[in-house]
Amino acid sequence: MELWNSTLGRGFILVGILNDSGSPELLCATLAVLYTLALTSNGLLLLVITMDTRLHVPMYLLLGQLSLMDLLFTSVVTPKTLTDFLRRENIISFEGCALQMFLALTLGGAEDLLLAFMAYDRYVAICHPLNYMFLMRPRVCWLMVAICWILASLNALGHTMYTMHFTFCMSWEIRHLLCEIPSVLKLACADTSRYELMVYVTGVTFLLLPLSAIVSSYTLILFTVLHMPSNEGRKKALITCSSHLTVVGMFYGAATFMYVLPSSFHSPKQDNIVSVFYTIVTPALNPLIYSLRNREVMGALRKVLRKHISPTQSTL
């Protein structure tokens, strides 16, 4: 059987969800709409948080980083998927596959850590409001953001380099939406069982430690909220936290399926559906979940839109 790797200058063939769909044109249009929604909603949220000084607080700084990660994450995968389908060409180079894997792992890992820091932010705001501005001062917030990006990048770099060092001979076809570790390892000639165990262990560690911090934070928040004397304060706290928990559930559910469940529970079709969910659907929904139920964000959005629409109307 032919051995090949990057030295031969050959690429992989991405056999994603559009290739296995019964109505690929309809699915392609749906993905295009979701991608447009993700770009628009995350872009607007970033614009509002940047322009409105009332939102220059720790909670919205972290939310802005989440929007940035979502915008970049979906852009790593979706444009390639759509253009490949329209051009009827599913080839991705060895280097392109490695880059896509690195960026997807970096952005996914950074979001994983960021959600834990966002839970801590809500814990401090609700359980220790008098110390909030000290515990979540700007230097601490930017340190949290830096930790997310640096740790995720280092983890992604190590995994990408080790995964792509294998010689591949099983097939050229990656039966997945993107170049992701489990799907690429299926093509390796060598025994990858030890490395797959390491991927599993690091995946569990990277997912379960932040998830444990999130669960602990919201358990303490729940106890505090239940003892609040004000119904309005209790309602506001629950609305804010429920938005975050919805995002956490969507992200960790998909990530757990991909990196924690044993390979015997996986099939290419299931993996493709889950990958569409966390690379395209979730980035489109996250800003809507946070903004539609948040009066401050909606008020700031209306203010920004009025500021930009009014001068345009006056010139007409």
Image (cartoon, rainbow, N blue to C red):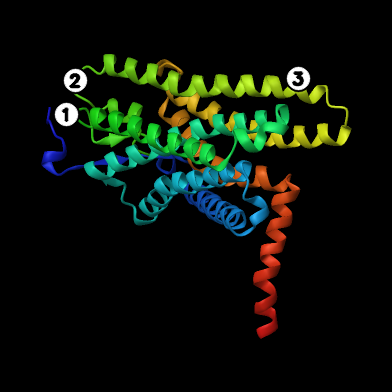
Determine the secondary structure under disc 2.
loop
| Badge 3: residue crowd in 10 Å (few <14, some 14–19, many ≥20) | few
Q: Contact (CB < 8 A) between labels 1 and 2?
A: yes
Determine the secondary structure under disc 3.
helix
First in sequence, mark 1 or 2: give its number.
1
Q: Contact (CB < 8 A) between labels 3 and 1?
A: no
Task: Write down the residue under mark 2.
Answer: 190
Residue 121: give x, y in percent of width and height: 62, 33
Q: Which mark is residue 167?
A: 1
**Residue 24 in view of the camera:** yes
In front of the other: 231 or 264: 231
Determine the secondary structure under disc 1.
loop
The amino acid type, in three-letter code, at marker 1 is Thr
The residue drawn where x is 12% and y is 27% is 1
First in sequence, mark 2 or 3: give its number.
2
User: Viewer-nearest of labels 2 and 3?
Assistant: 3
User: Viewer-nearest of labels 3 and 1?
Assistant: 3
Figure quadrant of the C terminus: bottom right
**134 w.r.t. 227: above or below:** below
Residue 119: give x, y in percent of width and height: 61, 30
First in sequence, mark 3 or 1: give its number.
1
| Badge 2: residue crowd in 10 Å (few <14, some 14–19, many ≥20) | few
The residue drawn where x is 44% and y is 34% is 147
Compute the Cα span from label 1 to label 2: 7 Å
